[in-house]
Each structure stands twice: as structure tokens, then as C-alpha cells.
Image (cartoon, grey):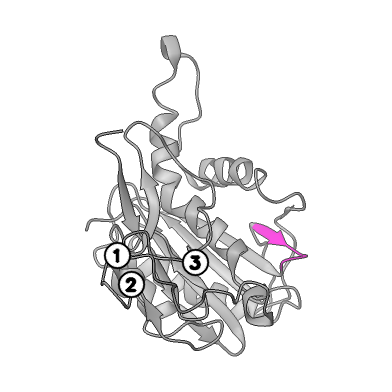
């Protein structure tokens, strides 16, 4: 297809895929893999050709997990550093399920937009508030996960308790969903996320907390900064903050 193109994949030298949308979201760059500590690369060490990532096809919204990192460079044919490591213990720990959720979050706004273009102007889901975001996210997650526990109670915090949006108990993931609106911009979202992160540290089934902020009106002025400030390891819990869509 003439207008289709490949994004770039960022991979650690042990073969853990960091992102397959590196050109589209360069702010996802990390120098070292959070799973094993290995150095990351986005080009072939032999010929410097970019590692092929997500295949963009005009008119097609992709939410499915992309293939794993290739074994050999498509240009020069030389092996990548991780070639032959797929069956090792380090590859078995590859964060592929986290990548699935990241891919859903990265393309969520495209799905929401496509829903507005139904045949013959039929009734559709308009993503106007946080409950709409939760409903659409829940449906998309069912494509990949069969045990999604919606809004279980979290441990007591500051004299009260709260509910989580989605718990994947087997994977030990929690997905927290937010939507910006008038009066709920950068400061308010940041304050809420700080409280959420502190609360989820106490939950026995939350080893990874993914906070998805849907910001279609661009109310968060510095999304990259907010993501960087709040993402990372927090007392043994992996925190990933994803704000979409955002300007490039």
C-alpha cells in the first residue's frame, strides 16, 4: 500500500520491546530496560537501519499487539543482539501484556473518533466523560484479557476507601482511567494521580499501575513532563502514566 509506513521499534539488547511507536512518541525513550537493565536500541548495530515497528495503514485503526522484535535486520540481514534469546528466562519475562495495554491507550482516541462515523448516522458511544472512557476501555480490554475485575475496593486510605477502575488479578495490573474536563486540568489530574499511586502501593495484587488520562481537548499543557514526573518504580510498584492524545 503506497501510503503505508513503518514506525520504529525501541528494544533492549535482551529483546524486550519498549515500544513499537518510537517515531510517533519519541518521549517513550528510555536508555535502559526496566525489566532487565539492558541498553536499548532503535537501529541495527551493523547498518543503522531503523528497527521496523508498528505498520501504519491509512484508514485502519490498529489496537492489536504488534509482532515481537525481529531476529534479523530486514536491510543487511545481520542478527540483532537478542537473536536466539527468545526461549531464555529473560525473554519469558518480556512485558508483552503491558505493551498490549499501552497499545490500547495509544490508539484509544482513534477508536473513539472512528465511532463517531457510523453508517447512516446510527446511534453510537460518545466519549464525553470518564464513565464513557471506562466503558470503551473495558470493551477493548476484553479482546485480550478474559478476567477483568471492574472497580474492586482498594485498601483504606486517609480514613476512607476508594474503588479502582480495572484489576487484572492474574497479571497483577491495575488500570486507572481519567478524562480531563473543565476544572480538571494538569494540576488537578497530577494531584489525583499522586493520591492514586500512594493508595495502590498497599494493594496486594497491584505490581504495575497504569494510569491512562484521556485528554482530547489538550487541557494538560505539558503531558510529557507529567508522564515523566510520575512514571517509574515507586516502592516496588511499577507506575506507567499515559496521556493521550497529545501534541507532538
C-alpha separation, residue under disc 2 versus residue under disc 3: 11 Å
Query: x%, y% of residue 80?
Result: 44, 74
Quadrant of the frame with the N terminus: top left
The span shown in magenta is: 166-171
Residue 187 part of the magenta segment: no
Residue under circle 1?
50
Q: Determine which quarter of the picture holds residue 92.
A: bottom right
* Residue nearer the viewer, 161 or 3: 3
Secondary structure type for disc 3: loop
Question: In the figure, is residue 247 to the left or right of 182?
Answer: left
> Looking at the picture, does residue 53 appear above or below residue 113?
below
Checking the image for residue 138, the label placed there is: none
Query: x%, y% of residue 51?
Result: 35, 64
Task: Give the residue displayed 52% in from the left and 55% down from the top.
Answer: 67
Quadrant of the frame with the C terminus: bottom left
Numbered label tally? 3
Residue 169 part of the magenta segment: yes
Question: In the figure, is residue 202 to the left or right of 4?
Answer: right
Front of the two marks 1 and 3: 3
Determine contact: label 1, label 2, CB under 8 Å.
yes
Residue under circle 3?
71
Q: Residue furthest top?
A: 120
Q: Determine which quarter of the picture holds residue 52.
A: bottom left
Residue under circle 2?
44
Task: Give the residue displayed 48% in from the left and 54% down from the top.
Answer: 103
Amino acid at each position: 500500500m503506497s501510503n503505508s509506513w513503518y514506525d520504529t521499534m525501541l528494544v533492549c539488547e535482551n529483546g524486550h520491546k519498549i515500544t513499537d511507536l518510537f517515531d510517533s512518541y519519541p518521549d517513550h525513550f528510555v536508555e535502559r530496560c526496566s525489566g532487565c537493565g539492558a541498553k536499548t536500541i532503535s537501529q541495527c548495530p551493523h547498518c543503522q537501519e531503523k528497527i521496523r515497528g508498528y505498520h501504519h495503514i491509512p484508514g485502519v485503526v490498529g489496537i492489536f499487539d504488534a509482532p515481537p522484535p525481529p531476529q534479523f535486520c530486514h536491510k543487511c540481514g545481520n542478527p540483532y543482539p537478542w537473536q536466539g534469546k527468545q526461549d531464555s528466562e529473560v525473554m519469558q519475562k518480556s512485558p508483552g501484556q503491558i505493551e498490549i495495554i499501552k497499545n490500547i491507550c495509544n490508539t484509544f482516541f482513534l477508536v473513539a473518533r472512528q465511532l463517531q462515523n457510523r453508517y447512516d448516522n446510527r446511534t453510537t458511544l460518545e466519549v464525553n466523560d470518564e464513565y464513557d472512557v471506562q466503558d470503551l476501555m473495558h470493551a477493548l480490554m476484553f479482546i485480550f484479557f478474559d478476567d477483568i475485575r471492574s472497580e474492586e475496593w482498594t485498601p483504606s486510605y486517609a480514613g476512607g476507601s476508594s474503588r479502582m477502575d480495572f484489576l487484572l488479578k492474574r497479571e497483577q495490573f491495575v488500570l486507572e482511567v481519567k478524562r480531563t474536563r473543565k476544572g480538571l486540568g494538569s494540576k488537578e489530574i497530577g494531584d489525583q494521580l499522586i493520591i492514586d499511586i500512594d493508595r495502590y502501593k498497599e494493594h496486594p495484587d497491584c505490581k504495575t499501575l497504569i494510569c491512562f488520562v484521556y485528554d482530547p481537548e489538550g487541557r494538560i499543557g505539558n503531558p510529557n513532563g507529567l508522564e515523566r514526573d510520575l512514571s517509574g518504580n515507586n516502592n516496588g510498584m511499577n507506575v506507567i502514566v499515559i496521556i493521550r492524545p497529545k501534541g507532538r
